[in-house]
Image: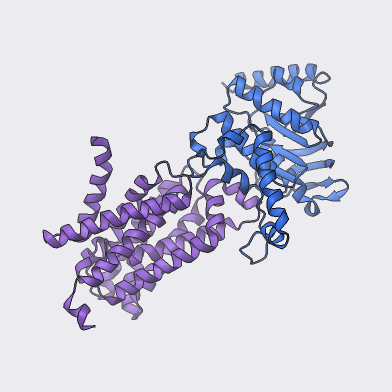
Amino acid sequence: MATLVAENLSYSYTKQSKPALNKVSVEIKPGTLTALVGPNGAGKSTLLKILQGQNAPDKGEIKIDGENLNRSRSLIALMPQRSSMNWKFPITVEKLVSLGQIKYSKSKSNTPFQIKALLANPNAWINKCCELEATMQRVGIANLANRRLDSLSGGQQQRALLAKTLMSPAKIFLLDEPCAALDPPAKEDFLKIVRQLADVGLSLVVSSHDWGESLNKYDQVIVLDKTVLAVGSPDSIKDKLNDINISALNENNSLN
Amino acid sequence: MSFINNNWWLVPLIITIFSGILCPAMGTVLITHKRLLQVNLISHCVLPGLALALALGIHPSIGGVISGLLGSVIAESLTNRKSENYEAVMNTILAGMLGFGVLIIPLLGIRIDLEAVLFGDLLTANFGDLLRTIIAFLVFMILITFGYEKVVYVGLDPEGASASGINVSLLNLALSFTTALVIVSSMSAVGVILVIALLSTPTLLGLNKAHSLRIAMMRSSFFGLCISLLGFVLSLVFNLSPGPAISVICVASLLIPKLR
């Protein structure tokens, strides 16, 4: 169980550019499913990368259970957007998922330090193999273990990527647009799985363009457009979302 | 030694075997990492290094590897792979380096058999050429033996690999260095320009339905070996130039499955 608190995060890609994020504060409680919604260019992916520690914010701080992010980075895992993956790579589903276990130390060693730990304790090998199988079963891809990645449907690929992310020892999982390009049934399936994961105590943040009905499946909704426009339960922010929809539409019309 | 002197075809044959295995294996890594354009870039960038090394009295291979690597580093530092200008910048540097090489050859007053460098001259290959091929083979084997997992992770998910602690830039530099080495080592077999065929065609055949990078590399190497040996035999029988013969067989091998 871990609580993530980020306060007043600001970030610009270059010194000259406009801020991608401006004074963003969020709190992710244990065992919750959070939707991070906003239009294109709202800074959703940027925020997730900062929360995971890939990018450092210009201002603000991030703490996990009161500790600085740098000390507890292993508690956060990021599932990247579909577009950052090379889906044509020759690899089986099982091998992809097992890559999620690997963490390389910053030392000169070529051996992943988790594997070193496993060598010291042979029983851990068996546990890891069980964990791999259990994780694949949990997301419903155990029967696809030996299939090549590019032979899967979009929904199956996303579930495989989720299983890889879940193999890390993290407690907070940041999923960057996992439902993009999925058809409605596949999207429904995916959201069902992440709901189950939240119910067993994991914290998940799912970024999305979808401002519609599916928001009811979340415990918390954060509306982002460079800064946090609204945060709360799906019901409590419904009216605000309508306003934001209208203003976004107006903005698009004026651009055209 | 007298056995080798009496059997002049032996060294070229061993080079054919090594190149036939090595180039497709390297090509498999590069194609799965979407770095094939880099091969073209490096192969065109080795010429100025070869010329300068000859003028300075250094072994030409060393100059070729350095200038190939330098061209690759310059191109990567001027753009990134996500930029829409990426291909334009790569092709500009490719043409510029080749042009620079052609310009300095007469200025330095050196003699280089350009045709042999660009298109290969396998039948006159010597022990030095063989040694170069074996060194490239060993370097590639070391990279794959000790870095296989990292090569797979970076090829599949560069962002995830970086987040898990892999130094992606260093691995890419190691790949560029090994690529430059493989290209220079293949100079005698197929030449620095036609090596692209041996790096890509067998890979296209080997990648099909392979369940891992390792299997894809092994299958590509098998196809590469068959193509290279066929090219070698045909060039002996019909008195052809082996490099262009191997390149033409590469194209033919792509067409055969389509004719079924």
Chain A pictured colour: blue
**Outermost residue toward the left in this view:** B238
At which x and y percent is residue A156? 58, 31
Q: Is residue B138 above or below residue B233?
A: below
Is the N terminus of chain B in the top left, top right, bottom left or bottom right quadrant?
Answer: bottom left
Chain letter, colour purple in render:
B
Left or right: where B171 falls relative to B64: right
- A69 lies left or right of A154: right
Q: Is residue B201 above or below residue B242?
A: above
| Residue at x-position 28% and y-position 43% | B254
Q: Is residue B236 above or below residue B200?
A: below
Residue that appears at 70% across and 44% down? A131
Q: Is A9 in front, or is A66?
A: A66
Residue name at image x 23 percent, y 59 percent: B243
> Residue B180 lies in what quarter of the image?
bottom left
Q: How far from the left and from the top, in percent, is residue B239?
A: 11, 61
Name the residue furthest bottom.
B2
Nearer-the-camera pick, A47 or B19: B19
Q: Is B43 left or right of A146, judged from the image as shown? A: left
Q: Position of residue B77 (x, y in %)?
A: 51, 56
Q: Residue A54: in sight, yes or no? A: no
Q: Confirm whether residue A61 shows in the render.
A: yes
Query: What's the residue at 65%, 45% (across, down)?
Result: A13
Q: Quadrant of residue A202?
A: top right
The x and y percentages for residue B22 are 37, 60
Q: Which is more toward the observer, B140 or B244?
A: B140
Picture quarter with the C terminus of chain B: top left
Furthest residue toward right: A66
